[in-house]
Image (cartoon, rainbow, N blue to C red):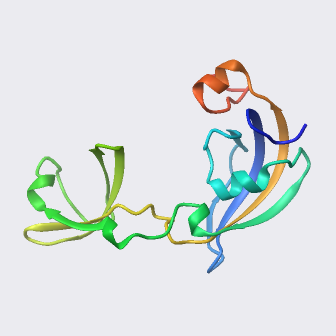
Amino acid sequence: MIIAHHKVVTMDYKVLNTANGELIDSSASGQPMIYLHGAQNIVPGLENALEGKSAGDALDIIVPPADAYGERNEEGIQQVPLEVFQEMESVEPGMTVMVETEEGPLNLVIIAVDETTVTVDANHPMAGKSLTFSVKIIEVRDASEEEIAHGHGHDPAHPH
């Protein structure tokens, strides 16, 4: 069976920062990844590269920023008044906070704090980075109606 829309794919993977070889994530220490193809569960560049592949295939894919987490947008770095964070116990660089926006939830990384302002970065931490994915496809199967309705694949060993 080949990978196509509404197929559930199980795969082992490793993700590296292409520029410096830094390991970002891997399934080596846990469970393989299970995703519903065509449901935007993974970055577009990887999903496109997996289209038409089948169980047993192994490949290395370099995904540029535009097909991964996007380019860095300097407009995503903003200063907001410190009082916006008044309900938080502490506000420190490196912290991630989730805010509700008109487009839905957004994670912000606090990059600087002074007496009156907090500088936040709305860019995804992987924005602007090319990523190298090494994947081994373990299984490809038809998605159930429930998986299609939920928009993601389910692990048969751990039902939803």
Q: Is residue 104 above or below residue 72?
A: above
Residue shown at the point (35%, 61%) measured from the top left = 122
- Residue 29, x across and y down, in percent: 69, 52
Residue 92 picture quarter: bottom left
Q: Is residue 28 visible?
A: no
Q: Percent from the top left, x then y, of residue 45? A: 67, 58
Q: Residue at x 33, y 65 (%)?
A: 76
Look at the image and tell me in which quarter the C terminus lies. top right
Farthest bottom residue?
Answer: 20
Q: Is residue 61 above or below residue 98?
A: below
From the top left corner, tell me how far across and down residue 111 is, in percent.
29, 70
Which of the 4 image quarters holds residue 101? top left
On the image, the x and y values in percent for residue 43 come to 61, 54
For the N terminus, which image quadrant?
A: top right
Up/down of 4 relative to 93, above or below: above
Q: Farthest residue in the top direction?
A: 145
Horizontal side, residue 19 vs residue 37: left or right: left
> Looking at the image, which is closer to me, 81 or 70?
70
State which quadrant residue 159 falls in.
top right
Please state the total of marks drawn on the protein image: 0
Q: Is residue 65 left or right of residue 117?
A: right
Q: At x 44% / y 70%, what residue is drawn?
A: 72
Residue at figure coordinates x 53%, y 61% from the top left:
69
Residue 105 in view (yes/no): yes
In front: 160, or 62?
62
